[in-house]
Image: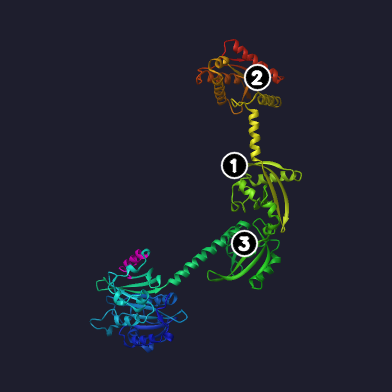
Amino acid sequence: MDRMIADEASAGGADGTLAAVFRQSRWPVAEVDDRLVLRRANSAFAALAAGTPPRVAGCRLSDLALPEAVVTMARDVVRTGLSGEVVTGRGDVAGTDGGSGGETFLLEPIVGTDGTTSGVLLLGDGAPQHGRSASPRRPGETDYRLIAENQAALIVKVDAENRFLYVNPAYCALFGRSAGELTGETFMPLVHEADRAATAAAMDRLREPPHTAYLEQRALTVRGWRWLAWQDTAVLDDQGRITAIIGVGHDITERRTAQMRQRRTLENLKAFFELSQDLLLVLDERGRIREINAAVTGRLGWTRPQLIGRSVIRLLSRHHRYQQRHRIRAILDGRSQSEPFTLGDRAGRPVPVETRVVRGTWDDAPALFTSSRDLSELSLLREKFERVFLDNATLMAITEPETGRFIDVNMAFLRALGLERAQVIGRNTVDLGFFQTQEARRQVLADVEARSPGEPTEMGFRLTDGRTLVCQWTSTRFTSGGAEYMLTMLTDITRQHELMAELERKANHDALTGALSRQKGAEELEREILRCRRHTGPLSLILADVDDFKRVNDRHGHIAGDRVLQALATRLRDRIRQTDRLVRWGGEEFLVILPSTDLDGALRLAEALRGTVGDALFDGVGRVTMSMGVARWRVGDSLETWINRADEALYRAKRTGRNRVIPD
């Protein structure tokens, strides 16, 4: 903040001006130092304090009979370096009659050559009651002008329409115009367009008590756009209407620039603090934790409430606390700035770190800033295995065996998962969908490690984005930096798996209808027979044949016949259970396998299937019917004898008129 009044020790001519004001002014004038001790005062000011100039000199401002608001404002001026103004009621001032109106005190900072506020100048606009004339002049214009003309601050007076009535030399110099050129003009054209609304709002606030306003705005000066801070005070007539506005301004461009730079720096520091992979802590002088970053909670598993306000000893490994206390003491005493420690995570696992410490302040109190580098991760000797790890075509990951937390992964791993590195490191295999639970992960890990070294395990993983990843998995444990890790190599065979599945599907299914092929159907029948022999449950089948299908081909063509077979298969498949299987047994012949179904249930289903087909109209062909033979598997039946009984029942249905169901 630019200074208002030069310190008298270096002010030169200003000192003579101030002395003249003290000698000649009929209005209260006083000067206090930065401790608010009165250096000097004129008779009018001393009378307000119920004393004389010699008696009040050397007194603290708070000990005089002055309104508390004046003392409070004086403290604020010393603290902030900004001018202020106080309007008091007459009854607030000793020696007055308590009538209408009020005493106005203008308080201006006295700034020394070192830039600090060394005192405050107080100037009142009234005189003691016994010395007032019937028509006192107001507001002490001559005295204000004597001060204003010798100020480095910007002092202006405008009317209620914001037209200049007075500008001091400092204002004229900053804007490169004379007082004559400015008088009668409005100030708003000089204000930056973006700040005009806020300026107008500040002017409006002057209409309401206490009729003062503080504003920061940009204005176009001879030095370009500059930030100015204004303390404005309204001058009121006896009816409370604004007759003029007195503004005291300071060029705060450097302060605003420094504040913006400081704010950006603090934002960058905060981002660095949170994003750092190192464990960062702020400690008070007694070693209690004041602040931590995300790496502390993420790596060690503690929560903020469990650490803030607690001793840093809590972070030390339980097994190493006693041995490490002397290192803590060396840091707190300032005898060391870097020490190795073994921290302990929430589960008690050791975490070796190298800790560096610097001293500073936090919330205006002495503090220690500590940065701990996790040696268990950094000791992996990244440079030596970069070519064989990061750039390997095989999916590779380094994890913690106990938690599955990812320490490092290579580029092939990231490409396969479609993730960025930051989305993987620090998370565990359950988070990324490799396993449903930690227990499932531990079970699979035990199975993998039980195999012969290098023997792969084929596994499928359902990833968080819904994709399925099929891999051949091999794992091996190794130790680095005193901690144990697991190197896992995954060969992505998802595409091969998909191709094999497609080949298997084609081999096991009829290409035209999608039903199981005869070979696959026979395998399924043999499997069901074995199950029945073990568990003695019922098992049946339906053998169905399209009636007069040759006539359909002869009359409508083979393409139409193929469409009929496709539609038939769809209708049959939609009607049977999920546990049942539909098989294309021959050209126009279908077989339905019915596990856990006795003969009566099979007959009812066969009748339903016959009706489903017979009631349909097939495109370009019309109605088509089917004859069906139903047979229940009997103990001692081979697959051949069972199928033959169903086949005989089918042909009885054909011979007895077609479009019917016959049991064996």
Which residue position is annotated with label 2?
632
200 falls in the magenta region: yes
Label 3, on which residue? 279
Density class for disc 1 (Cα within 10 Å; few <14, some 14-19, many ≥20) is: few
In the image, is residue 25 above or below residue 379?
Answer: below
User: Residue 445 location in percent, x, y?
Assistant: 70, 46
Outermost right residue: 452
Query: Where does the N terminus fall, quadrant-wise?
Result: bottom left
Q: Is residue 325 magenta?
A: no
Of tags 1 and 3, which is closer to the observer?
1
Residue 642 showing in the rendered view: yes
- In the displayed structure, would residue 228 be above or below residue 535? below
Three-letter residue code for mark 3: Leu
Q: Residue at x 65, y 16 (%)?
A: 647
Residue lying furthest bottom: 54
- Tag 1 near tag 3, CB within 8 Å: no
The quadrant the C terminus occupies is: top right
Looking at the image, residue 661 sits to the left or right of residue 324; the answer is left
Give the mark, 1 or 2, whose residue is nearer the N terminus. Answer: 1
Residue 248 location in percent, x, y? 36, 75
Q: Which residue is mark 1?
A: 467
Q: Is residue 171 left or right of residue 615?
A: left
Q: Is residue 399 visible?
A: no
What is the CA distance from the residue labelled 1 to the residue labelled 3?
35 Å
The span shown in magenta is 195-211
> Mark 1 against mark 2, which lies toward the viewer?
1
Image check: 593 left or right of 16?
A: right
Q: Amino acid at mark 2?
A: Arg
